[in-house]
Amino acid sequence: MDYYQRIQGLNVLMGQDFMRLKFLIGSEEQLNLFSNIKVTYMNLMRCFEGNVSLVKSDGSIISSKEYNFEVEQIIANLKEIINQNRQQISENTDLTNHLIRQIFIMTLIITVLTVLLGGLIAFFNTRAITKSISSFKGKIEEISKGHFKELQTIDGPLEIRDLSIHFNDMSQKLGELDNLKGDFISHVSHELKTPVTVIKEASIMLSNDLYSDHPEKLYELYALIQEECDRLLNSVLRLLDYSKMEVKAMDYQFTDLDLTLIIRKSILKLAPLAQKKNIDLEFSPPPKIPNLSADGDRIREILDNLIGNALKFTPINGKILVKCLLEKKIKRVVVSITDNGCGIKPEYLNAIFEKFKKIDNGIGTRMGTGLGLSISKHIIKAHGGDIWAESDYPNGTQLFFTLPLV
């Protein structure tokens, strides 16, 4: 009985070993060997469990030698499986070593190529950047000498190309600023030279008592000096006002304004100038305009400037029409000043509102030597309106500005 129990215990252990062995099977041949081992073992165990002599499947007695043969066959099959596994492990090890060598070689090649490629990229990038910097250096030296020429777009990295574009914009603006500086000096010289010269000459005449016996002449000289002083003061004040407008520091006094009354006062003020040139200066108001919220002094300044320009460029016996139109749908008032003067070329219609801008009207005169239209544009924009010009060159010009209703 003890012998039988030991056989049963060994059978359980063999079953567990068979399960572990099955997980190690890696090929079809090994699977066949494993099946033969298991079948042979099961036949042997059935013989022991039946407590009979070893019997073949057909009922004949199995001899002790045949039993030993089948046990040896099981051992041989196990050894074959073990040898095949060892061989497979050896092959896998060799394959792994081969793959490791291949990976090492590929890694080495990639590393060398990466270093070479990085070196080439760094070389060409450094060369391109150095060339670009050299171009910038030459351009900066030209700018330092006052030559604001455009720099050709540099072929190089995207950042360098963008930098060259922005550099050209900067150079262009510096050139415009340099030209503006010249225009400013020319404007100031023109505006200040004449009144200063007149005041100087009149003062010399007074100091030499040239008209001591002619009181009326002395009165004219005093009046001339006062007039030129006022002109000089107005020029300085306009420059100061414009500088404030540029930095949006101008102080406007908004009050209820009767625009029709302001226009009539401006026309009345400039009527003597129109009479000197026999110009027909007319005003065509609408039936009724509601009061506006605006700075009356600044609006009057705009009207004086626009009507004054029209008088300046309208020929003798010409005509100027001032109109005021109420646009209820978009809640604004449109004022227009139309003359039959020399007109403005279409390409200059926007430029006339730039500071110190001089334009050629094609008939031998230069227009826009002051700040009047530029100041007018600043004032209108501050009131929430708009200003523009239209021209039927060379038959006349129309200037428009709008003011919003309250």
Image (spheres, grey):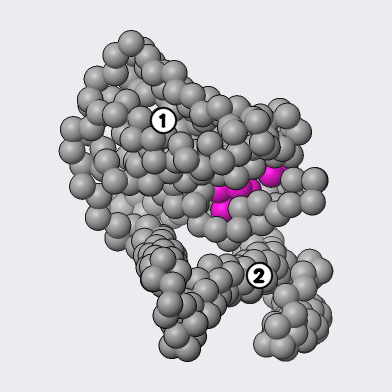
Question: Dot 2, how many residues are within 10 Å of its Cα: few (below 14), some (14-19), or many (20+)?
Answer: few
Q: Is residue 154 left or right of residue 208?
A: right
| Occupied quadrant, residue 139 | bottom right
- Return the residue nearer the eye: 219 or 161: 219
| Occupied quadrant, residue 197 | bottom right
For this orientation, the residue located farthest to the left is 255
- For numbered disc 2, what is the local secondary structure? helix
Position of residue 196 relative to residue 7, above or below, is: below
Residue 107 sits inside the magenta stretch: no
Q: Earlier in the sequence, mark 1 or mark 2?
A: 2
- For numbered disc 1, what is the local secondary structure? strand
Residue bearing the label numbered 2? 179
Q: CA distance from mark 1 to mark 2?
A: 31 Å
Q: Position of residue 80 (x, y in %)?
A: 67, 60
Name the amino acid type tagged 1.
Thr
Magenta residue span: 347-355
Q: Position of residue 22 (x, y in %)?
A: 52, 49
Q: Quadrant of the C terminus?
A: top left
Residue depicted at x 39% and y 35%:
268
For this orientation, the residue located farthest to the front is 213
Q: Is residue 44 left or right of residue 404?
A: right
Q: Which mark is residue 402?
A: 1
Position of residue 195 relative to residue 380, above or below, is: below
